[in-house]
């Protein structure tokens, strides 16, 4: 997050497990999220942090039901 939030991302949370990085973000659209994660900037940032390439990642998109407190 050093570079600031990307366009379209409204909220961001992340956690690290023994062998995984979990990112939970609230985005304007699925397209905005997929564009961000396909970008070379994001690929480079993950590589610098020691994580594998995005093409090896599992991405699950869920529809947001509610946000408390509101954005």
Image (spheres, rainbow, N blue to C red):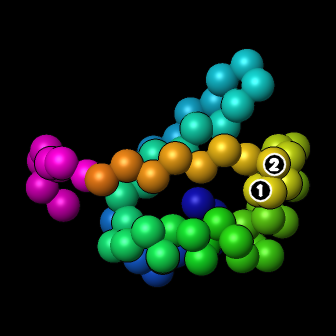
The residue lying toward the viewer, choosing from 12 and 56, is 56
Q: Pointer 2 and pointer 1: residues touching (CB < 8 Å)?
A: yes
Total marks shown come to 2
Disc 2/disc 1 C-alpha distance (Å): 5 Å
Callout 2: helix, strand or loop? helix
Q: Is residue 45 above or below residue 62?
A: below
* Residue 58 at x, y percent in the picture: 66, 44
Q: Is residue 68 above or below residue 37?
A: above
In the picture, which quadrant includes the C terminus? Answer: bottom left
Residue at left offset 48%, top offset 76%:
32
Label 2 CA crowd tier, 10 Å (few <14, some 14–19, many 20+):
few
Q: Which residue position is annotated with label 1?
A: 54
In the picture, which quadrant includes the N terminus? Answer: bottom right
Q: Which range of residues does the magenta coloring cover?
A: 64-71
Q: Is residue 43 above or below residue 17?
A: below
Res. 45 visible in picture: yes
* Residue 60 at x, y percent in the picture: 52, 47
* Residue 63 at x, y percent in the picture: 30, 53
Query: In the figure, residue 37 lies in which quadrant?
Result: bottom right
Q: Is residue 44 above or below residue 21?
A: below
Residue at left offset 57%, top offset 69%:
34
Q: Is residue 16 left or right of residue 70?
A: right
Residue at left offset 79%, top offset 64%:
43
Callout 1: helix, strand or loop? helix
Res. 12 visible in picture: no
Q: Which residue position is annotated with label 2?
A: 56
Q: Is residue 16 left or right of residue 24?
A: right
């Amino acid at each position: 997050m050093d570079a600031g939030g990307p366009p379209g991302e409204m909220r961001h949370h992340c956690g690290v497990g023994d062998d995984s990085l979990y990112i939970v973000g609230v985005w304007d659209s699925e397209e905005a999220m997929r564009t961000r994660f396909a970008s070379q900037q994001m690929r480079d940032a993950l590589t610098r942090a020691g994580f594998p390439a995005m093409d090896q990642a599992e991405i699950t998109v869920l529809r947001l039901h509610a946000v408390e407190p509101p954005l």
